[in-house]
Image (cartoon, grey):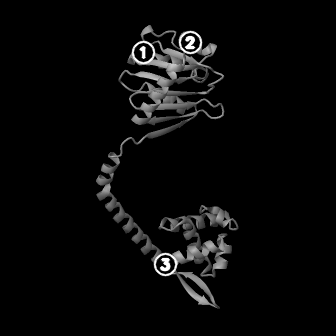
Amino acid sequence: MSVSIDNFADLGYDVAMKQSQILTTIQDAGLSEKGALVYFALLELGGAFPSRVSKHTKLKRSTVYEVLDDLAIKGLVSELEKRGKYFYSIEHPKRLLHFSQRSIAKAEEQYQKLQEFLPGLEGMYAGITNKPKVSYFEGTDGVMEIYEDHISGKKKYEMIGFVNIAEIMQFLPEKKYRDYVRIKEKLGITTRGILPDTTADRAYEKTAYMAASKKILPQVRFISKEEFPWKGDITIYAENKVSIISFDQQKVSGIIIESETIHRMMRMIFELAWKGALVK
């Protein structure tokens, strides 16, 4: 539940806005949303039984009991037995100020302790080996970032992957893909790819690499599009990266995984598939 003007729907707009601002200030003192709402209800009502607080705040009665107990422990409300039931009222508002000061002091103390322990935590984190980093990208602009990452390094390397050229050429503007190939050529990035056996993919070199020099023309092999249909792109690249892109028309998306272990594993899978694929 969020604290908002909706909690004061029966009041005039200006009054409701003022009430909402006061409520937000109470919450900022360190109370939860529900805690602030119950505290403010008691302030408005001048004290009340839990059943009335529940009706006033539109919170479940069981929730109100839990919140009142918490506020009582914090010293912000007092409870008095009336007619066999507990009646609650707030303590002087200065108690709320003191509670906020204590919360700030405790937070600062915890922050200082964390600062002291941070070097040790960082050392332990650095000692974790083979922890993969996964970055998620969504939409056309997001997936474009993945292709840009393929050519963002300064070193030459061999790019390998499972590629559906027909899907890529529909997704990437022709100029973008030509620029992509041009930068690969500049960096000396060579390519091996496994493609679905289609007319469009067999024309790979003439479409995507028509302006490239022969030294970076991809080595390609093919697999049956009927047995292995896919609408995506898996690229093993750089020294430790794997990108996976889905060309789902409803939601184009992709990820980049940074992990030497996963990179080596995916390279082995590719080599296994390469041996069984059809030579052009």
- Mark 3: which secondary structure? helix
Residue 82, placed above or below residue 269 = below
Q: Quadrant of residue 185?
A: top left
Label 2–label 3 contact, CB within 8 A: no
Q: From mark 2 to mark 1, how far is it between C-alphas?
A: 16 Å
Quadrant housing the C terminus: top right
Residue 149, placed above or below residue 7 = above
Residue 11 vs residue 164: left or right? right
Residue 212 in the image: state x and y as whole percent: 47, 10
- Name the residue beneath numbered marker 1: 185
Asked if one can make out residue 259 in the rendered structure from this viewpoint, the answer is no
Q: From mark 3 to mark 1, how far is it between C-alphas?
A: 69 Å
Q: Quadrant of residue 101?
A: bottom left
Asked if one can make out residue 279 in the rendered structure from this viewpoint, the answer is yes
Residue 96 in the image: state x and y as whole percent: 47, 74
- Mark 1: which secondary structure? helix
Residue 73 shows which numbered tag?
3
- Name the residue beneath numbered marker 2: 207
Residue 155 vs residue 26: left or right? left
Q: Residues within 10 Å of mark 1 (few under 14, many from 20)?
A: some
Residue 212 shows which numbered tag?
none
The one nearer the camera, 274 or 24, is 274
What amino acid type is highlighted by mark number 2?
Thr
Residue 122 in the image: state x and y as whole percent: 32, 50
- Is tag 2's residue or tag 3's residue first in the polypeptide sequence? 3
Residue 117 vs residue 193: left or right? left
What amino acid type is highlighted by mark number 1?
Glu
